[in-house]
Amino acid sequence: MPGSTTTRALDAVAALAEAAAQQRGVSLVGSDLRLFENRITVGTRDRTDETPVSPFALGRAYELLLTPKNRRKTGAHLTPEDVARNLVAMMPSPALGDTVLDPAVGGAAFLIAAADQLVSAGASPAAVLGQLFGVDIDPGAVAVAEAALTLWGLDNGVGAQRLPNIGQADGLLEALPRASRVVGNPPFLNQLRSSSAHTARRRSALREKWGELVGTYTDDAWLFLAAGLDALERDGVLAMVQPVSVLAARHGDPVRRHVSEQATLRGLWLARDQVFDAAVQVCGVVLGTGKNRAEEVQRCIGADFSSAPTLAAQPDASGWGSVAAATMNVPQVNLTRQPGNTIGDVASATAGFRDQFYGFVPFVSECASEEVPATHAKLVTVGMIDVLGLGWGTRSFKFAKRPFERPVVDLVALADQNPKLADWVAARRRPKLLVATQTRVVEVWIDMRGEAIPATPVVSVEPFTDDLDQLWMLAAALSAPALSAHFLAVNFGTAMSLNAMKIAARDVLAAPLPTDQVAWREAAALLQSKPVDHAGFAMLMGRAYRTADDELVSWWLDRATNHTKS
C-alpha cells in the first residue's frame, strides 16, 4: 500500500497529467489509466493558455514530490530529457518493428525518447505504443510512466488507452520481456551506504539469481546491465545510464567480465558534469550483440554529449576505465610488464583498516613543537602528503574530525592499552614510503628515518631490504608520470572526483617497475637534490618506463604544480 507521501505525490502528478491532457483537448479522468483509477475528479485548473506540459514532466514531478529519504532508499533519480534523447541517439537506427524494453522504467523518459526515434524511422505512433515495454518495482512509477506515454500518444494522434506492456515487476529478480532494444536509467543502490544497502533477504535472492556477479558491494545498477543483456533478442542493442563506478570498481569486475563475454562496447558517454540532483557521477554505456557488435567505440562527454575521439579497438573487461579516462585527456600509457618486475616483488604495502584508524583516536594529540619526543611518533594523514614532500607541521589538517598541525601518537599509552595496534605500529617504524590516495597525481613522501605512522588510508610501502638507495628508487618509480596516468586510468571513477585517483595497496604492489635502469637511477638521484627539478625528473622517468612523451610530462607537471614541495 503506498504511503501517504507517495499518495500525495501521485495525486499531484495526476492533476498535472489531467491539466496536460486538457491542453490537448481531452480528459483522462475516468480513463483506464492506472494513475486515474478510482479518481472521479482531480484538483486541477484550466491551463490551456500556458506552455504545454511535456510527457517528460510527469516523471520529474513524481521524483521531486517524493521525500529525499525515499529517493535515496530506492536509488531512483529520473532521467533528464536531453540525457535520454542523446543516449538513445548513440544506438544504431532501429528497424520499424523493433521492440524496446526499460527494466526500471521510472517516468518513461527513455521509452519516450525511443518512441520518437522509432517514429522518425517511419513507424506509426499507434504501433510504437505496442512495441514499448517497461517494468518498475515501484507501482507509483508504473502509473506515472503509463500516463507519460499516454501524453506522448496524444501528441502523436493516438487516443488514451491502457498500456498492458507497462507493469510492476522487479527487473532484477523477475523474468523480463524479450526486446530488440533495452534502454534505461536503473536505480543506483550503493551498498557502502546504509540508506541504500540491501536487506539480507534481498541480497540472498540476488545471489541466487545472479551468482558470482553479486558481491558484498555490488551496486544494483551494474546488475541491470546483465539483466538487460539477458532480455535482448539475438541481434540487440542496449543503452543504459550507470554510476561511473561501473567502469573500474574492483567489485564491478565480475559484471564487466560477464558483459564483455556477451556483447561489445559500442559507445561510452561520460557525463563529467552533474546531470542529476543526486551528487553522483554518471556515465552511459551502449552495448551490442550479434550483428550489432562493433570494434570501434563511440565516445561522448559532458551534459551536451560532445563528441570525443572514437576508440579504434575494443577494450577488455579491465579497460573500461581507460576508455573513459581518455575523454578527460588522461594520457594513455602502455607500461611494459615483465615477470618478477613489479613493486610487489621488492616491497610490501599496507593501508591499514578501520581498526587502525579508529584505534589511534584516543592516543592522538597535538605536539608542542617540531621536535617529537621519543615517547611519541608523527601521525601522517593523506592530506599531509605532497609530491615528494610532507606538510606535517606547516598547516592545519583533520584527523577523526579534529584539527591538528602536528598530530602525534602516544606510543607508551598505546602499548599499554592496545598491544595489537602497538605491534602494527612497531612494524611500520622503519624507512618507508607513504603514499596518499584520492589525489590528482601519485603523491609520495620518503620517511627516511621511519619516524612516522600512516593513518588509514595512507599506503605504507616497505622495501624488503634496508638499502636506502632502494627507497629512493621506489619513490622515483611511484612518482613517475606514467604511473599517475596508469593509476588514474585503471581506477577511473572510483575516487570522489573524476580528476582524482584512488590507490589501494594492491594497486601499488601490481605496478610494474621501470625497464631502463640507467634512466631510473638518474631520476632517483635527481630526487635527492634540492630543489628538485621536477621537469627533468619527469623526462628521465619517461625514459625509464619507455613512455617518453612531452604531452605526458606536461600533463603531470600541470597536475602536480600545486603539490610539489622543494
Image (cartoon, helix red, strand yellow):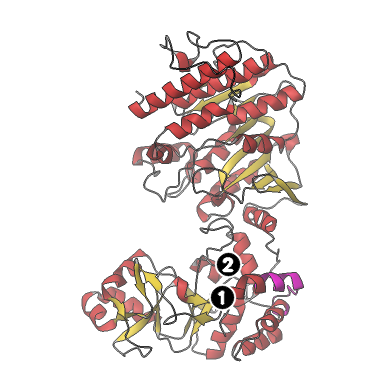
The tag on residue 196 is none
Viewer-nearest of discs 1 and 2: 1
* Mark 1 residue element: helix
- Asked if residue 7 lies left or right of residue 438, the reply is left
Res. 177 in view:
no
Q: Which amino acid does label 2 sit on?
A: Arg
Q: How crowded is mark 1: few (under 14 residues within 10 Å), some or many (20 or more)?
A: some
Looking at the figure, which quarter contains the N terminus? top left
Which residue is at 59% across, 48% downward?
256
Foreground residue, 219 or 236? 219
* Occupied quadrant, residue 566: bottom right
The tag on residue 440 is 2
Q: What residue type is labelled 1?
A: His
Which residue is at 41% across, 73% downward?
397
- Mark 1 and mark 2 residues within 8 Å of each other at the beta carbon: yes
Q: Is residue 552 magenta?
A: yes
Which residue is at 44% across, 70% downward?
351
Which residue is at 63% across, 90% downward?
525
* Mark 2 residue element: loop
* Occupied quadrant, residue 103: top right
Q: Is residue 326 magenta?
A: no
Q: Earlier in the sequence, mark 1 or mark 2?
A: 2
Counting every numbered tag in the picture gives 2
Q: In this view, does 496 lie above or below 17?
A: below
Foreground residue, 290 or 451? 451
**Part of the protein shown in magenta:** 543-556
Q: Position of residue 477 (x, y in %)?
A: 61, 78
Residue bearing mark 1? 563
Q: Position of residue 489 (x, y in %)?
A: 63, 61
Residue occupying the far left of the picture: 416
